[in-house]
Image (cartoon, helix red, strand yellow):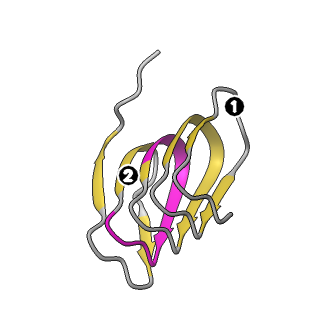
Amino acid sequence: INCEESFIYIDCPINSISLTNCLNCTIVAPAVKRTCTIDKCEKLVVSIATNFIRIGSCVDSKIFVYSIKHPFLFGDNRGVVLAPFNVGF
């Protein structure tokens, strides 16, 4: 919550992740078992593999996602780019 100009790399499996009010951050989470929620973020770059991703009210963000289910977009998203997962082991 409220991260600014940060680089966060999570290299172990986690159940879920929530990114809220982040500004100008890069986040890599290659093993999220359940849900990823990205809400009210700006200029975010996220590389994530998850079961389900929710994106809400984000601006100018790039989300590289590998997901079993389709992404769920809600709220006022502007300039959000969804791209294929780009992290390899």
Q: What quarter of the picture does the N terminus occupy?
A: bottom right
Give the numbered dot on residue 86. Answer: none
Residue 22 point in image, percent of width and height: 55, 63
Taking 72 as reference, is 33 left or right?
Answer: right
Q: In the rendered structure, does residue 69 fall within the stretch colored magenta?
A: no
Magenta-tinted stretch: 46-60
**Image quarter of residue 3:** bottom right
User: Which residue lies at the image location 56% right of the left edge and 58% below the top edge?
Assistant: 4
Nearer the observer, 30 or 6: 6
Q: Which residue is mark 2?
A: 63
Nearer the observer, 29 or 71: 29
Q: Which residue is mark 1?
A: 13
- Residue furthest front as drawn: 5
Q: In the rendered structure, does residue 52 fall within the stretch colored magenta?
A: yes
**Image quarter of residue 38:** bottom right
Nearer the observer, 10 or 83: 10
How many other residues sit within 10 Å of disc 2, few (<14), some (14-19) or many (≥20)? many
- Identify the secondary structure beneath mark 1: loop
